[in-house]
Amino acid sequence: MSMADKIANAEAFGVGTYLEPGLYLVEVQRLKEQVGRFRSAGTTAFIAELLIVESSNPVRPAGVGVSWYQGENKLGYDGRIKKFFHALFPDLVAMSEKDPKRYPAEFRSIYEGCVGTENLAMGQRVRVQVTATTSQAGRAVNDHQWAPAAK
């Protein structure tokens, strides 16, 4: 295979577009897991590809596609992903309280259906408030607070 053939068949990588501080209603386009490259080589990341439906931030208006990235190499990634799924599937919250023994299997089933070829969450909407804050390491980061979208 020639170099041109390899390039033609390669996946193009770009810099992601992320949510900036503001209030949003977003629609899920795709949820996926991806094995990291470069500095996070070998670690798995959860990526939500979202379409902004409503926005309070003119830098990220309605119609813009954005990503939310959570790498397993970051402290607290699992709790942040869980909150995202609880906003998408509010019945999971009730189940975690009423039937804690059944919850892990049900969550796993929903999660795998969302990141797999079924793409169960596609088209679902969720609200998110993004706030600029400082990490424990002193870096500027954006905090995401997910909430169910009103039906």
Image (cartoon, helix red, strand yellow):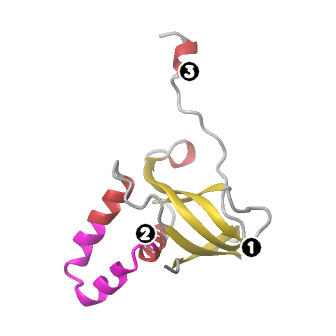
At 52% from the left and 10% from the top, the residue drawn is 2
Residue highlighted by disc 3: 8
Does residue 87 appear in this view? yes
Looking at this rendering, what residue extends furthest in the right direction? 58
Q: Is residue 36 left or right of residue 117?
A: right
Which is closer to the viewer, label 3 or label 2? Answer: 3
Residue 92 on the magenta span: yes
- Looking at the image, tell me whether mark 2 or mark 1 is earlier in sequence order: 1
Q: Which kind of residue does numbered mark 1 sit on?
A: Ser
Residue depicted at x 47% and y 10%: 1
Residue 5: percent from the left, percent from the top? 53, 15
Residue 106 in picture, x, y percent from top left: 25, 71
How much space separates mark 2 and mark 1, taking CA atoms?
28 Å
Q: Which residue position holds label 2?
A: 78
Q: With respect to residue 64, does 142 lie above or below?
A: below
Q: Which residue is mark 1?
A: 56
SS class, disc 2: helix
Circle number at residue 72? none
Q: Earlier in the sequence, mark 1 or mark 3?
A: 3
Residue in the image at 63% along x and 74% along y: 143
Q: Nearer the viewer, mark 2 or mark 1?
A: 1
Residue 123 higher or lower than 23, as above or below: above
